[in-house]
Image: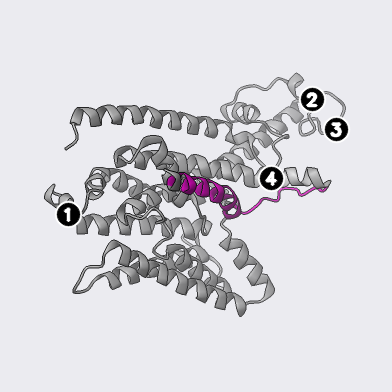
Amino acid sequence: MSDPAIVNVGFRKYAARLLAAFGFLLVVLIVSPGIGTESSSIGWWDAWRAELGIPIPAEELSGHAVADLNGDGSISDDERDGFVKLARVIGFSQRFARSLLALQVGITLALCGATFQVLFRNPLATPYTLGIASGGSLGALIALRVGWTGVILGISTMSLSAFGGSLAVVLLVLLIARGARRLTSNELLLAGVTLGLFCSAMMVFVTSISNERVTFVIVRWMMGSLDPLRTVEGAMLLPMIVPSWVVLIFVSRSLNQYRLGDELATSRGVNVLALQLVCVCVCSLATAAIVAQCGPVGFVGLVVPHVAGLLVGTDCRVLLPASAILGGTFLILCDWASQVSMRVAGELTGRHLGSATLPIGVVTAIVGVPIFLILLRRRLGS
């Protein structure tokens, strides 16, 4: 048995790394109001001063294309007031709100991914393992195909359809798991993957019988998106995902025992069946909420927990918070790349692409695949 003193020393060492990661996340959030499709127009310091009511001297804005509207080289009071309002809207109503949404999505997917990898004892398990993303995508596609558009209690009907599709898959997996013999983790994993493949096949069918306009919307949605920028849309996720954060952090000690095997965990007072059921339901509901709002965003739940494990070890008391922090940071940085990349591409090709952005799912794949292959190579070489 491990010496508690040694365990506590290791916990404190990794806790320091956790605090460092949290500090970096704060820095990322501070500069996020200055990162966007038109980063040269409004800087992060301009946005913060506008939001906090700190005066911006007129001489700083001389020659600024956004502030000097008439191009006379001098800034009038009206021009300065207009610049302050514009900086506040672009910096916080758009960029910062988008980063907060990315933070919520990244935390949830990474935290659920780390939990699933422990729960299924499989390093390839992700929040979408049980077919949650495929079920949600199928629900949204059906809503698009039948023209079910509108808003109910401030939530789009497509989001409600996606949420319903995700929940249907989760309930079906849990129904399959109930029987005379309880399914093992690998069998439960296989059931989820099978249902996910079925939903993917049905998605292809729905797409094949849709017109060009609907097909374009379907394909775009399936790439994942953080485009919903209104604060209320991001805030609506919180009641569905914050409880999952609390529950998963709370059961981290039990997950540490679960790593040692079912029998040993049971002998130490862990109700294995209840732990599995709680983790699967909580992760599934939280992921379903994310899919319903933003579409499928891949590789966050797969790659981030592995990186967190390299930094802080396998102690779930630190691994889960570290995965959450790194997941939020990772997705914010990927969102920056999705916005800035199109502007850079426009400069290289001599074209003005305006406010076009790459789908966030494309960026996470481009960034996540090389990282995962490097980690896999490292694992095979060790």
SS at circle 4:
helix
Q: Are marks 1 and 4 in contact (CB under 8 Å)?
A: no
Position of 102 with respect to 192 (left or right) is right
Residue bearing the label numbered 1: 271
Going from N to C along the chain, the mark reached first, 1 or 4, is 1
Mark 1: which amino acid? Asn
- Identify the amino acid type marked 2: Ile
The residue depicted at 57 percent of the width and 51 percent of the height is 226
Q: Quadrant of the C terminus?
A: top left
Q: Which of the 4 image quadrants contains residue 33? A: top right
Q: Is 215 left, or right, of 378 in this rendering?
A: right
The residue tagged 3 is 70
Q: Quick one: label 1 or label 3, which is nearer the N terminus?
A: 3
Q: Position of residue 173 (x, y in %)?
A: 33, 69
**Looking at the magenta stretch, what is its main secondary structure?**
helix
Q: Residues within 10 Å of mark 2 (few under 14, many from 20)?
A: many
The answer to whether the residue labelled 1 contacts the one labelled 3, judged by CB atoms less than 8 Å apart, is no
Magenta residues span 351-379
Rendered position, 169 above or below 304:
below
Which comes before the other along the chain, label 1 or label 2? 2
Element assignment for label 1:
loop
Residue beneath label 4, please? 341
Q: Are marks 1 and 2 in contact (CB under 8 Å)?
A: no
Q: CA distance from mark 1 to mark 2?
A: 68 Å
Q: Earlier in the sequence, mark 4 or mark 2?
A: 2
Q: Which residue ends up furthest to the right in the rendered image?
A: 72
Mark 1 or mark 2, whichever is nearer to me: 1
Q: Which residue occupies 46% across, 63% down?
A: 133
Q: Give the x, y percent position of residue 229.
A: 57, 48
Helix, strand or loop for disc 2: loop
